[in-house]
Image (cartoon, rainbow, N blue to C red):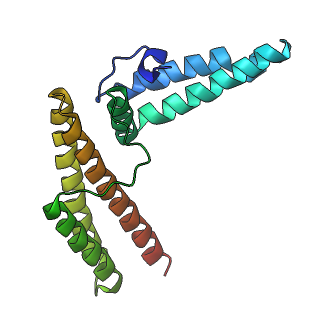
Amino acid sequence: MNYFELFQLPPQLMLDTALLAERYRALQQQYHPDRFAAAPESERLQALQHAAEINSAYQTLKDALSRAEYLLSLQGLDIRGEQQTLQDTTFLLQQLEWREELEALREHADPDAAIPVFEQRISSEYKRLSQQLETAFNAAQWMDAADLIRKLKFVRKLRDELSRLEDSLMDL
């Protein structure tokens, strides 16, 4: 089942997420297992399976990176769940620097001032990479798109770690 076809949306990186959510709710209502409570068991199981597929499709398409990975898989390049290392040494060195900076924030004299500065730099990088990803998709440069997705996943993970650090510092 093609997730874009399921939601009657064009297979593209940029989606109308409000329309996606609207179509998700309509499909969920149509295939909700409660609607099939009095139906034969085979129909109940089929409705349950449809509901699970709809949920999985929605979770994939509502997240920009998951959607990008899914689009690549439609092009025959499945990178979902892979553990491939990037070959971009400049980005790898940047990763190391960011990791060191993140660790240094734990011991910073004024983390409340330093964290937003670091967060802004990381968010700017995420936005820059996202724009490059859109360009790569528009140009059908699938290998470039795959590398950009890998980079974006790292930056998103770094942002998540920064958020956890911020939360832990607030608990002190």
Q: Nearer the viewer, residue 16 or 55?
A: 55
Relative to residue 123, is residue 17 depicted above or below? above
Residue 166 point in image, percent of width and height: 40, 70
Q: Nearer the viewer, residue 84 or 58?
A: 84
Which of the 4 image quarters holds residue 112? bottom left
Q: Tally the marks.
A: 0
Residue 17 point in image, percent of width and height: 39, 28
Any part of residue 113 in sight? no
Residue for point 22% across, 43% down: 130
Which of the 4 image quarters holds residue 116? bottom left
Residue 145 point in image, percent of width and height: 23, 39
Left or right: 154 with respect to 127? right
Residue 93 point in image, percent of width and height: 18, 69
Residue for point 28% across, 87% down: 109
Relative to residue 106, is residue 38 depicted above or below? above
Q: Nearer the viewer, residue 62 or 67?
A: 67
